[in-house]
Image: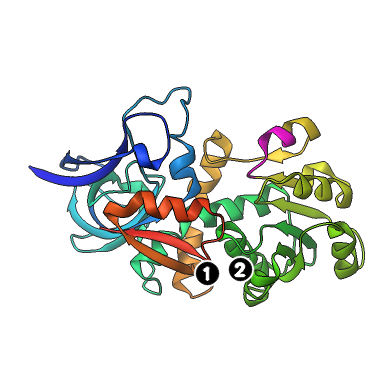
């Protein structure tokens, strides 16, 4: 019997209420693989989804949605999302349950060959932010030659979106603090300072109103400026202000929505390929030991970690 350490939520609440426990790792069946976790990505959703009771979710809840690691066991007649797999292969996996662990058995279709261009800490943070960014561009029909506004351009989703937009020939004007403006430039965007007068500053940079607005921060300013600058509300999307979206008739997406889940599953392989080609990078600000998961989430909650965070078992 294989036993692994893993973080679980046994009560609804913040990371300080989670438990690090020892749990049996089941042997993989057909369509499954077991992965020794070398890094687990740290995302706001990890804490958000167990902060309060959610319909259809029962405690205890294993924590963590994306990992990078090495395959240690393979179920019979099993292939991973990217094809053939062997013991010892490095893989990245996304939309898993319980990634904050030392070892994990998971559906094989969720695993892809890890890009050799990325470290485990980088690879473990590639797909949640990357698929979210890709969906934001997709649902707003952002097209080559267009200029779009991105609220929160220096954050994890923003940095991935800047890179994906640049590859498509889409110009991005991205909000950021003055301290983070260079990050936006480094990844192909045009930085703009948020705060009073934002709409006028965006118009000055674009030469006109923009045609798409992408909100990754959820502030009233982001939504208000988006509504002021974009005439077609079907081309405004938020990942952080669902209540405002419902009230204003704009798009809101989330990984828990069936349509979003389908899109994000379909785009995984494309993003892995972009990373393998060196066209998609993942800045990592800091790593933490697995047993310091609450500290990692506390830093993330401050809002400005300066890049992605990873747990290293």
In this picture, which residue range is highlighted in magenta?
239-245
Q: Say left or right for 133 vs 231.
A: left
Residue 180: mark in rendering: none
Q: Say left or right for 105 vs 130.
A: left
Residue lying at 56% horizontally and 35% vertically, measured from the top left: 257
Residue 2, quarter of picture: top left
Farthest-out residue, left: 1
Whether residue 245 is visible here, answered yes or no, is yes
Q: Position of residue 98 (x, y in %)?
A: 32, 43
Residue lying at 35% horizontally and 29% vertically, measured from the top left: 11
The residue lying toward the viewer, choosing from 80 and 110, is 110
Whether residue 210 is visible here, answered yes or no, is no
Q: Say left or right for 41 vs 104.
A: right
The crowd level at tag 1 (other Cα within 10 Å; few <14, some 14-19, many 20+) is many
Task: Look at the numbered disc 1 and give the secondary structure of its residue.
Answer: loop
Residue lying at 45% horizontally and 67% vertically, measured from the top left: 284
Labelled pair 2, 1 in contact (Cβ < 8 Å):
yes
User: Image height check: is 43 above or below 166?
Assistant: above
Residue 163: mark in rendering: 2
Residue 170, quarter of picture: bottom right
> Magenta stretch containing residue 288, yes or no?
no
Q: Which residue is mark 1?
A: 280
Image quarter hosting the N terminus: top left
Residue lying at 17% horizontally and 46% vertically, measured from the top left: 4
Task: Look at the numbered disc 2 and give the secondary structure of its residue.
Answer: helix
The residue lying toward the viewer, choosing from 227 and 144, is 227
Q: Position of residue 268 (x, y in %)?
A: 47, 54
């Amino acid at each position: 019997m294989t036993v692994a350490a893993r973080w679980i939520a046994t009560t609804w609440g913040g990371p300080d209420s989670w438990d690090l426990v020892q749990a049996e790792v089941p042997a993989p069946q057909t369509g499954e693989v077991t992965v020794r976790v070398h890094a687990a990505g740290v995302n706001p959703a990890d804490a958000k989804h167990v902060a309060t009771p959610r319909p259809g979710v029962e405690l205890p809840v294993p924590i963590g949605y994306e990992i990078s690691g090495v395959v240690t066991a393979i179920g019979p007649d099993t292939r991973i999302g990217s094809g053939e797999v062997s013991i010892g292969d490095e893989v990245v996996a996304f939309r898993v349950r319980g990634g904050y662990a030392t070892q994990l058995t998971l559906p094989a279709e969720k695993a892809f060959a890890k890009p050799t261009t990325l470290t485990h800490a980088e690879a473990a943070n590639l797909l949640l932010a990357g698929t979210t960014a890709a969906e934001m561009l997709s649902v707003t029909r952002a097209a080559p030659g267009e200029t779009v506004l991105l609220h929160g351009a220096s954050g994890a989703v923003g940095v991935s979106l800047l890179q994906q937009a640049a590859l498509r020939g889409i110009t991005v004007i991205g909000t950021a603090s003055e301290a983070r403006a260079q990050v936006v430039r480094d990844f192909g965007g045009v930085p703009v300072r948020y705060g009073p007068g934002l709409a006028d500053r965006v118009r000055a940079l674009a030469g006109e109103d923009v045609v798409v607005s992408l909100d990754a921060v959820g502030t009233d300013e982001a939504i208000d400026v988006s509504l002021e600058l974009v005439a077609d509300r079907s081309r405004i999307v938020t990942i952080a202000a669902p209540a405002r979206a419902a009230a204003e008739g704009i798009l809101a997406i989330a990984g828990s929505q069936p349509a979003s889940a389908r899109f994000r599953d379909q785009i995984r392989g494309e993003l892995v390929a972009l990373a393998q080609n060196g066209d998609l990078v993942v800045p990592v600000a800091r790593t933490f030991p697995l047993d310091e998961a609450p500290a990692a989430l506390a830093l993330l909650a401050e809002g400005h970690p300066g890049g992605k965070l990873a747990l290293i078992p």
